[in-house]
Amino acid sequence: MKKILLAVAMILTFTVCGCGYTTKSLLPSCYKTIYVDNFKNGIKITAEQSNERMYRGYKPGMEIKITKAVIDKYLTDGNLRIASPESADLVLSAELIDFNRGGIIYNTSDNVEEYRIKLVVSMELTDAKTGKTVWKEPGFAGETTYRTSGSLEVSEDAAIDAAIADLAKRIVERTIGVW
């Protein structure tokens, strides 16, 4: 009998309390709109390569694609509306500081079979009314992996798009999550 009562109590507890997951924003209620400033390109494409940075690269216009992807993600998420700089509650400013493509799986001939693409941005979220920094992330990243052969082969352009989508998702989650 005690086991049955315990089971019923647990079921009621989980049913009434839920699991704690919500799709609502954890932002303070005073923040309803955001302006996403155009991402800047801060990648130093002329910098010398080193052993750690053998695969430095950059695709022209990547910062434009990232800006568009972040705006689209905010629109899809719906917790913050996109606004002009004059009417926004928050302003997101960011700079693309690194694009890294490195091999992670090699075949027996030392040819790369799988790469990891990592996009790193430095960003800051400010309160547009007060000018105070809400949070700052100096090395925030989005990434993906892609294979160069076989049934799971993906083009580098498609992989870059996936890394941009991952970065945009993480930026929006960082913004609407608990600070």
Image: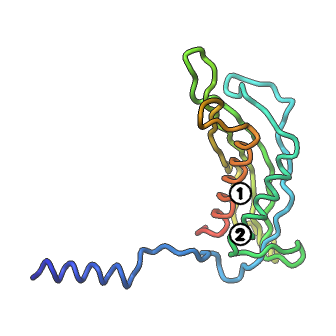
Nearer the observer: mark 1 or 2; the answer is 2
CB within 8 Å, label 1 to label 2 = no
Classify 2 as above or below 94. Answer: below
Residue 86 x, y percent position in the rendering: 90, 76
Task: Say the numbered circle drawn on residue 168.
Answer: 1
Q: Quadrant of residue 15?
A: bottom left
Figure label count: 2
Q: Quadrant of residue 119?
A: top right
Q: Could you tell me which secondary element the residue under label 1 belongs to?
A: helix
Residue 67 x, y percent position in the rendering: 81, 57
* Amino acid type at image mark 2: Thr
Between 47 and 81, the one lying in front of the other is 81
Label 2: how many residues lie within 10 Å, few (<14), some (14-19) or many (20+)?
few
Residue 46 x, y percent position in the rendering: 87, 30
Give the residue at mark 2.
76
Residue appearing at x 84%, y 54% in the figure: 39
Find the residue positioned furthest to the front: 151
